[in-house]
Amino acid sequence: MSTIKELVARYYSERGYTVEKEVSIGKGKAVDLIAFRSNEKTAIEVETGKSNAIDNISKCLKENFYRIVSIAVNQIVSKKIQDSLQSMGLHPNLKNKCAFYT
């Protein structure tokens, strides 16, 4: 697991979440991290620009997570994700469900 994923897992663990890494959600798909607390299940995807971030967000939306967190490793990746979501008309609809960080 990458150092960024380890840092994110530790961040959530220190805040009372149970964290699972590289969790299969079926059909050959996985989520980088899933953080559990009470009845909340948060999907966390660390985006490096090598995978399709929009596909990652979409697969998490289909699984009906309480929250979806997308963490871009730099501003270039972050801008690419935001621009793609806006061009698809999805970005405004995701505000309550998704959080984006760099």
Image (spheres, rainbow, N blue to C red):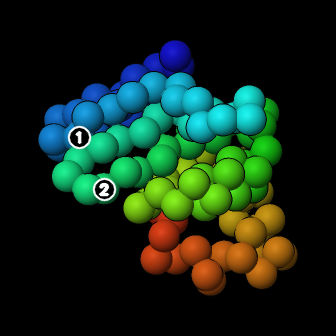
Residue 69 seen in the current view:
yes
From the viewer's perspective, tell me whether residue 13 is left or right of residue 21.
left
Give percent across and percent down for residue 58.
Answer: 70, 58
The image quadrant that residue 29 belongs to is top right
Seen from this angle, which residue lies furthest front? 26
Q: Which residue is mark 2?
A: 40
* Residue drawn at x 35%, y 41% as measured from the top left: 35
Residue 4 seen in the current view:
no
Seen from this angle, which residue lies furthest right? 87
Seen from this angle, which residue lies furthest top? 1
* Residue type highlighted by circle 1: Tyr
Location of residue 33 with respect to 74 vertically, above or below: above
Q: Nearer the viewer, mark 1 or mark 2?
A: 2
Q: Which residue is mark 1?
A: 17
Location of residue 5 with respect to 95 vertically, above or below: above
* Residue drawn at x 26%, y 34% as measured from the top left: 18
From the viewer's perspective, tell me whether residue 61 is left or right of residue 44.
right
Location of residue 38 with respect to 17 vertically, above or below: below
Name the foreground residue: 102 vs 64: 64
Q: How many marks?
A: 2
* Residue drawn at x 61%, y 81% as measured from the top left: 93
Give percent across and percent down for residue 4.
Answer: 47, 28
Give percent across and percent down for residue 83.
Answer: 77, 68
SS type, badge 2: strand
Mark 2 Cα within 10 Å, few/some/many (few <14, many 20+)?
A: few
Location of residue 48 with respect to 59 vertically, above or below: above
CA distance for labels 1 and 2: 9 Å
Are circles 1 and 2 on residues that touch, CB within 8 Å?
A: no
Give whichever of discs 1 and 2 has the lower sequence position: 1
SS type, badge 1: loop
* Residue drawn at x 38%, y 35% as measured from the top left: 8
